Image (cartoon, grey):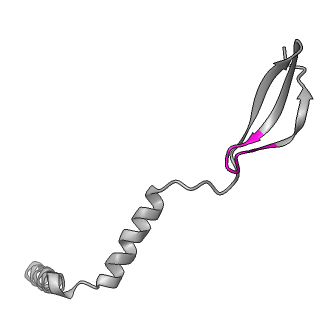
Amino acid sequence: MKKNIFNLLGVLILFVCINLTPGMYNTEFLNNIENIKIEKNGIEPKADVIYYVHTTLNGIRMYRLWNQTQNRYEGTWSICDCK
């Protein structure tokens, strides 16, 4: 029984080694894998990056939203009630 299992494992290992010769690689598959790796390494936000910008005008603290993705302000200046 053990001899049959070892023979089967040997045949499987031989079969795998024969099929993995360098000339038999599917180059299209490998190119797709490389493209996937590049896409995953490049971070691409799916939503706009928006944060608050604060300023003081005539002693009054004000805020406004800045859209970093589109490089523009969103809305108007509002009085900040923060302490």
The quarter of the rendered structure image containing the C terminus is top right
Q: Residue at x 80, y 38 (%)?
A: 65
Q: Residue at x 46, y 60 (%)?
A: 40
Q: Position of residue 5 (x, y in %)?
A: 14, 80
Q: Which quadrant of the structure image shows residue 31?
A: bottom left
The quarter of the rendered structure image containing the N terminus is bottom left
> In the rendered view, would you say 80 is above or below 9?
above
Left/right of residue 76 with respect to residue 16 in the rendered view = right
Q: Residue at x 70, y 46 (%)?
A: 71
Residue 12 appears in the rendering: no
> In the rendered view, would you say 77 is above or below 70?
above
Left/right of residue 76 with respect to residue 49 in the rendered view = right
Q: Residue at x 36, y 69 (%)?
A: 34
Q: Which quadrant of the structure image shows residue 78?
A: top right
> In the rendered view, would you say 49 is above or below 7?
above
Outermost residue toward the front?
58
Find the magenta span and give its range.
66-73
Q: Nearer the viewer, residue 3 or 68?
A: 68
Q: Position of residue 25 (x, y in %)?
A: 23, 84
Q: Position of residue 18 (x, y in %)?
A: 13, 86
Q: Position of residue 24 (x, y in %)?
A: 20, 87
| Magenta region includes residue 44 | no
Left/right of residue 29 with respect to residue 50 in the rendered view = left
Residue 74 appears in the rendering: yes
Q: Nearer the viewer, residue 77 or 11?
A: 77
* Number of marks: 0
